[in-house]
Image (cartoon, rainbow, N blue to C red):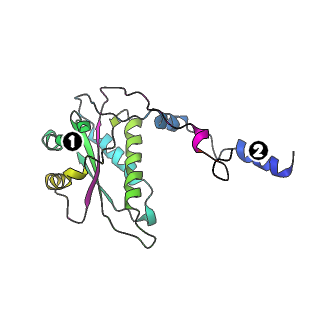
Amino acid sequence: MSAAEAREEAIHNRTAQEPDMEFFSVINSRRSVRKFKDDPVNRGDLEKIVAAGIEAPSGCNAQLRWYIIVDLPDVMDRLRSISNALRSAPAAIVLLVEPQGTKFGEFWIQDASAAMENMLLAAAALGYGGCWVEGEVRPHEDPLREVLGVPDNLRVWSVTPIGLPAESPARKPKSEFAEVTGYNGFGKG
């Protein structure tokens, strides 16, 4: 075996630390849940979920994201009309963004996406379901802004319902690793 081949084999076979199988289990088991049990969501758990969103990466560390935890039934009732995903949810987290650039460009959409994914994974790790609701938010942004008292400089970007799942959605088909991954160049195995 050449030195280069030995190096490649060593890199391929090592990891920085033992893998956290629970983490990968959460990633592989997370589903978009749109039907929930009536049980209320513990406020401490909602705060843990938002804390995971806050920990998400942010372009230039601008952190142009804000969060509204909704757990009062009367406020939830006012949100339910925007999406079927919210109809039976006992709680929701609304993600707000401040659309402004940095010296390297605009990253607020990516920042919001990273925060939402972290929150969905945290919810799943705690045994809750959630669903990334974004497209249905656009036509309802002004009413949401009014209901939630969102300042003019922020956008209501996305919402996730949070609750104990009343359904176990099947895994949607995903791309095969070898079909979408190359090493050191496109399409190279």
**Residue under pointer 2:** 9
Query: Could you say which disc has been placed on residue 71 in the image?
Result: 1
- Tally the numbered discs: 2
Residue drawn at 41 percent across, 62 percent down: 107
User: Badge 1: few (under 14), some or many (20 or more) residues near its Cα, within 10 Å?
Assistant: some
Mark 2–mark 1 Cα distance, whole angstroms, equals: 51 Å
Q: Is 17 left or right of 5, judged from the image as shown? A: left
User: Badge 2: few (under 14), some or many (20 or more) residues near its Cα, within 10 Å?
Assistant: few
For the C terminus, give its image quadrant.
top right
Q: Which is more toward the observer, 70 or 85?
A: 85
- Give percent across and percent down for residue 93: 28, 46
- Give percent across and percent down for residue 12: 71, 44
Q: Which is more toward the observer, 123 or 134?
A: 134
Whether residue 46 is situated above or below residue 166 in the rendered picture: below
The kind of residue on which mark 2 rests is Glu
Query: Could you say which disc has been placed on residue 17 in the image?
Result: none
Residue drawn at 46 percent across, 71 percent down: 104
The kind of residue on which mark 1 rests is Asp
Outermost residue on the bottom side: it is 103
